Amino acid sequence: MTDCPKCDHETLVKTEELGKIPLDVCPGCHGIFFDKGELEALLKQSQGEVPAGFGLISPKPDTIDCPRCKVKMSRGGLVNPMLLVDKCDSCGGIWLDPRELSLLKKLLGLSGGPEGVQVARPAPAAVGPEEKGFPVLKYAMVLAALLGLALVSYELYVYFSPAGSVEREFSAGMTAFGALLLAGGGIGAIKA
Ligand SMILES: [Zn+2]
Ligand SMILES: [Zn+2]
């Protein structure tokens, strides 16, 4: 996870859309972080000679942190004192805002090649198990199954009791209804 040095809560996304070089691009501000050597490699793909290694012109302490090293970067001119970019003294990485890449190419007299790259935010990672609503249906099914079981038990109790000891008479209809509730509720509870 590499955070964007400019945006809060943005994570850089690796993409090879720019010159088949695995660059880290911010989905928010579309800034690009070039690891040491990557910017040179990209610029070499446009025609033209590229100065080896970019040293900053009159670098000053920067306010943003290197997304790799988490140390303050330096801000200075790249190729031209007017093109101010952020560079990490520690790892040699360079952060370019979207328009800085095209400015740099203009300054170097390079033409062709891609100008920038857009990336989509990655889908947010699922946090723990999926939050499920209260499983009302499942409980209703279990309740129906229990009610069915009670009905069937009661009717069987009535059926097997000696005649006269129970006031009610056995009802085949209620038994069937109870059995249906039990079966339906049972299957429903498992599937819900
Ligand atoms: Zn950003
Ligand atoms: Zn660094």
Image (cartoon, rainbow, N blue to C red):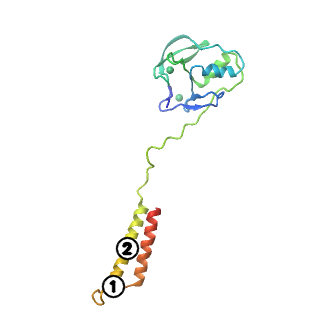
Query: For the residue marked with disc 1, what is the amino acid?
Result: Phe
* Residue carrying label 1: 160
Residue 52 - label = none
Kindly indicate the quadrant of the structure image that contains residue 54.
top right
Q: Is residue 72 left or right of residue 13?
A: left
Query: What x and y, as percent, mark residue 4?
Result: 51, 28
Query: For the residue marked with disc 2, what is the amino acid?
Result: Leu
Kindly indicate the quadrant of the structure image that contains residue 119.
top right
* Residue carrying label 2: 149
Q: 152 and 55: which one is in front? A: 152
Q: 110 and 68: which one is in front? A: 68
Vertical arrangement, residue 49 with respect to residue 115, above or below: above
Vertical arrangement, residue 109 with respect to residue 157, above or below: above
Q: What residue do we see at 70% from left, 16% from top?
A: 109
> In 3D space, how far apart are the residues under numbered discs 1 and 2 (Cα atoms)?
16 Å
Q: What residue do we see at 33% from left, 83% from top?
A: 158
Q: What secondary structure is found at the residue carrying circle 2?
A: helix
